[in-house]
Image (tube, rainbow, N blue to C red):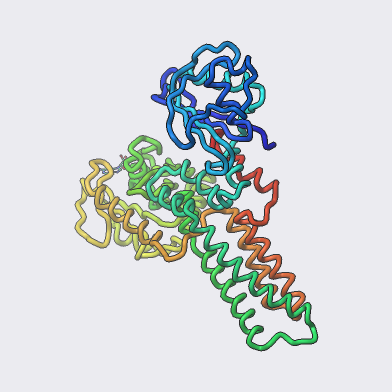
């Protein structure tokens, strides 16, 4: 990583099967202006024209230009160019965007032409966003939100990423840091002037401030909405063998993923499907039938089924309408950890054979699809209730959770510290942890990890 001029294709690589209407190449860095001149002005390269006498397009306006091969002067494509002056660009540096026709040869020749200049290099993954961070355009939570926005597959994921990109988490964490730093300033004053005891009013204020911080962080850590939304809401399908669990998964996933069979105990491992149910990302898991298993492998399957049901955010208990499903329901529910009548759903399947009229359950025929819209409605309502919007923006990443955990531990030590100096030291550590989340306290290895997950050109 250096401060040089970087370039990359910002749109997907056009293939023979899928060329694009347009492709966008981005350039950023101190020599972007020079590059643009060499690429758009005939023979500029030979004349050795410098960027000091520019004929750059007006900044922030789309301008039609012919893109030239700087070594031969041959026209590569005609397209739209946008020029950005520093610091009024996404990266905060001088930047150019070339909107070209999205053909393989066009994009290949354009990238090669920039390479031929000899003073630009291909960007690393996430390098544009990283430069934006380095130039104070965004903090780390906002940069991570850009990655989330690009990765968002459902509408609710997109909303969450947008909220975070707009600075919701940045503001929350910065407010906490401001509060913590004010407490720290009081504690440090008490250390610097040891003869004067901390006035009682201020001592209370510091303690209250730290306690409030600890409580707010604890509530934030308790809130799993954000991670559920990023990673998917985990729903486990459980029930006795042959009830139609695998058939339900197939129906919901609209393809044959799980093995459906008349032989009881066919599904021994977990099978997952990733679905978008009404905008909620869902990871649906089919599990082995709950029964006293015949062999060791099936036993393991049953054990995993129970574990998965316990870990899931929501459970669907599938029962066979042709049997005594009420008795089975009552027995099984007692054995399923964390079963919650208000959230988890009993699905009575095979109603094509034995009709069921009972509003407390979702009647279904996985065979015909009858009852599916009602079941989907129930799942969506339960998901919406689980994800119910709170006032505070939710925590979204394991990285934030881990670092907030450190912050919380340090705060607890500070609150319990027998001396002001010790309290101040722990509070300082807590504030450093908060600063690492937003990037106010920068750690280069951490930045490498975060931006590595981006795509090239972002
Ligand atoms: N009549 C009828 N048969 C079904 C229905 N759903 C599943 N089955 C049948 O029940 C058997 C067991 O289904 P499967 O999905 O493998 O059940 P699992 O063991 O719970 O996963 C298969 O023969 C399915 O074709 C349904 O709604 N109606
Ligand atoms: Mg099955």
The residue sitting at 67% across, 66% down in the picture is: 430
Query: 152 or 438, which lies in front?
Result: 438
Quarter of the figure with residue 313: bottom left
Query: 153 or 291, which lies in front?
Result: 153
Residue 125 locus on image (x, y percent): 59, 36
Residue 343 locus on image (x, y percent): 36, 62
The residue sitting at 68% across, 52% down in the picture is: 442
Quarter of the figure with residue 315: bottom left
Query: 313 or 143, which lies in front?
Result: 143
Q: Is residue 41 visible?
A: yes
Query: 59 or 367, which lies in front?
Result: 59
Q: Is residue 291 visible?
A: no
Q: How many marks?
A: 0
Whether residue 399 sits left or right of residue 318 in the image: it is right
Residue 369 locus on image (x, y percent): 24, 43
In the image, residue 291 sits, relative to residue 49, either above or below, namely below
Q: Quadrant of the C terminus?
A: top right
Residue 184 locus on image (x, y percent): 68, 73
The residue sitting at 58% across, 67% down in the picture is: 176
The residue sitting at 50% across, 45% down in the picture is: 146
Q: Quadrant of the N terminus?
A: top right
Q: Quadrant of ligand 2?
A: top left
Whether residue 346 sits left or right of residue 22 in the image: it is left
* Residue that lies at the very extreme toward the front in this rendered image: 53
In the image, residue 62 sits, relative to residue 117, either above or below, namely below
Whether residue 161 sits left or right of residue 215 in the image: it is left
């Amino acid at each position: 990583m250096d401060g040089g001029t970087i370039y990359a294709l910002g749109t997907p690589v056009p293939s023979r099967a899928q060329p694009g209407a347009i492709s966008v190449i981005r350039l950023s860095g101190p020599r972007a202006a020079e590059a643009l001149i060499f690429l758009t002005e005939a023979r500029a390269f030979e004349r050795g024209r410098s960027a000091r006498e520019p004929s750059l397009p007006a900044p922030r306006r789309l301008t039609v230009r012919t893109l030239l091969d700087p070594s031969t002067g041959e026209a590569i494509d005609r397209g739209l160019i946008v020029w950005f002056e520093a610091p009024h660009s996404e990266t905060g540096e001088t930047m150019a965007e070339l909107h070209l026709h999205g053909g393989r040869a066009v994009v290949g020749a354009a990238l090669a032409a920039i390479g031929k200049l000899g003073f630009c290099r291909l960007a690393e993954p996430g390098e544009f966003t990283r430069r934006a961070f380095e130039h104070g355009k965004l903090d780390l939570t906002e940069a991570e939100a850009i990655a989330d926005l690009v990765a968002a597959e459902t509408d609710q994921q997109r909303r969450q990423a947008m909220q975070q990109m707009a600075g919701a988490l940045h503001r929350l964490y910065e407010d906490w840091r401001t509060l913590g730093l004010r407490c720290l300033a009081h504690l440090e004053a008490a250390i610097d002037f040891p003869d004067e005891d901390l006035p009682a009013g201020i001592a209370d204020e510091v303690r209250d401030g730290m306690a409030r911080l600890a409580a707010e962080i604890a509530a934030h850590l308790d809130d799993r909405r954000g991670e559920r939304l990023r990673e998917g809401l985990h729903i486990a399908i459980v029930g006795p063998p042959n009830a139609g669990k695998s058939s339900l998964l197939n129906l919901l996933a609209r393809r044959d993923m799980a093995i459906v069979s008349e032989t009881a105990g066919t599904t021994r491992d977990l099978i997952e499907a990733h679905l978008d149910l009404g905008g909620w990302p869902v990871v649906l898991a089919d599990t082995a039938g709950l029964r006293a298993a015949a062999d060791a492998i099936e036993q393991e399957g049953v054990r995993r089924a129970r574990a998965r049901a316990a870990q899931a955010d929501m459970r669907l208990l599938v029962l066979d309408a042709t049997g005594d499903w009420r008795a089975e329901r009552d027995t099984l529910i007692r054995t399923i950890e964390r079963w919650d009548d208000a959230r988890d759903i009993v699905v009575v399947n095979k109603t094509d054979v034995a009709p069921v009229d009972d509003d407390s359950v979702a009647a279904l025929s996985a065979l015909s699809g009858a009852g599916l819209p009602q079941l989907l409605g129930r799942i969506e309502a339960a998901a919406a209730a689980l994800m119910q919007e709170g006032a505070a923006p939710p925590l979204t990443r394991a990285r934030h959770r881990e670092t907030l955990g450190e912050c919380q531990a340090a705060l607890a030590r500070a609150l319990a510290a027998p001396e002001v100096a010790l309290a101040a030291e722990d509070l300082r550590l807590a504030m450093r942890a908060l600063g690492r989340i937003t990037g106010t306290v920068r750690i280069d290895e951490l930045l490498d990890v975060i931006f590595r997950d981006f795509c090239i050109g972002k």
